[in-house]
Amino acid sequence: MPSTALVIDDDYDVQHLSKLLLEQHGFAVETVGSLGELARKPALLEAELILLDLGLGKFTGLDILDYLHDLRLQTAVLLISASASQAVDHALEVGRQKGLNMLGFLPKARLLGGLADFLAPLAASAKAPWAAELEHAIESDELFLVYQPKKALKSGEITGVEALVRWQHPRCGLLFPDSFIPLAEKHDLMNALTWQMLELALIQQTRWRALGWDLNIAVNISAEFIRAKGVIKTFDALLKRHALPAPALTLELTESVGIECLGYASHVLEALRDRGCRLALDDFGTGYSSLVQLYRLPFGELKVDRRFVNSLESDEAACAIVLSVIDMGKRLGMDVVAEGIETAHQLERLTQAGCGLGQGYFISRPLTAAAFTHWFKTQRSSSNPHYPASTPSISSAS
Ligand code: C2E
Ligand code: MG
Ligand code: MG
């Protein structure tokens, strides 16, 4: 696989020239003109080299350096600018202070003759491509799950958890799914990742069951997972190996994939539902589901996207949407889950509106298995009538 480079410059001539030169050195090159464009294509950040213009209209190269720092990326950065200046020195200094791999500065006028000087040492220290690292991470214990409780709003009972993947990257620290799921999608690693997360979820399920806790675990799956050959056979084998029943799991499929495209895989969804596995339509309201498909496909749960929940207090339209979805879900015999509840007021509003279940930082942030075990024990020993004071010991759980 060739090395990858990203050119960030709002000057299309510079983009074009840089692309040509880098391609001559064997790089596969992408170009973007703004931070906004970059934020919409995070997979581009897997590049091994970034050529960064300092002046980008509304934003500056410093904003991009902040972004790279926030994502804890170690990509090599070469600053390009019309001329040397204090701003360039300052940006190099800031980048280095942030721990970024700053290669130096090249005036745009010297791109043609000067670029090669910076590329030679880079080739010598080329790091393993992200895709290979991710593949390794899936097989090792670098990927792990955190668990966010799902609460029945009226009774206060914790009915289950949603499992969310995290990557403890050896160099970059803790990475969130938004920064590596696009890579997994691009490099055909989603199915491997999903099976591994199901495996981890079932191991955890067994541990909690040993404590007498019957918690449904929701795992996020992708559309490719449903479309893959032999998914039901592998799913059955997985449950058998862990000696767990299908109702122990919920599979969440995000609405933004477009549920229309699932039509031809509906027999797979039905087979999962017939086994007792719950199916949830995630981030509802962000895609373009036709209501007919929603009715036809065997989803038992609708998860209202957190953007609507967040705007409950401030935006009448968002409020109307949430109330309508709750009503529609009920009429279709589906459970409605409100995602991203962050305030007491939102919780109260949703409970009053008859929303069945909720998740969000106000209830609990996603927790490691050990932290969830501790949190859940505290819930059970509180005055909540759902949980009698005598709880099993948690010392062996993790
Ligand atoms: P999602 O499935 O909709 O998960 C909910 C996301 O909202 C999680 O982000 C969670 O940490 C965050 N969240 C929960 N409560 C709140 C809140 O009150 N406020 C705010 N602002 N955020 C809240 P996370 O863990 O970063 O996951 C992002 C997305 O990545 C998930 O959205 C899901 O689509 C995807 N994802 C996560 N884990 C997996 C996985 O194992 N497999 C697949 N295929 N996708 C995954
Ligand atoms: Mg989800
Ligand atoms: Mg969601």
Image (spheres, rainbow, N blue to C red):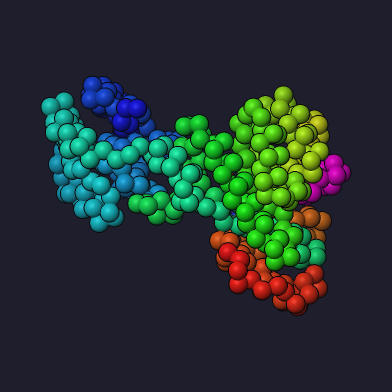
Q: Residue at x 58, y 41 (%)?
A: 194
Q: Which contiguous range is marked in magenta?
A: 321-336
Q: Against 391, is 316 above or below?
A: above
- Along the viewing direction, whichever of 289 and 170 lies nearer the viewer: 170
- Along the viewing direction, whichever of 138 and 336 lies nearer the viewer: 138
Q: Residue at x 72, y 54 (%)?
A: 216
The quadrant in which the N terminus is found is top left
The number of callouts visible is 0
Residue 284 visible in image: no
Residue 232 visible in image: yes
- The percent coordinates of residue 12 (x first, y second) are 31, 26
- The percent coordinates of residue 94 (x first, y second) are 25, 53
- Along the viewing direction, whichever of 42 and 91 lies nearer the viewer: 42
The quadrant in which the C terminus is found is bottom right
Q: Residue at x 60, y 47 (%)?
A: 199
Q: Is residue 97 magenta?
A: no
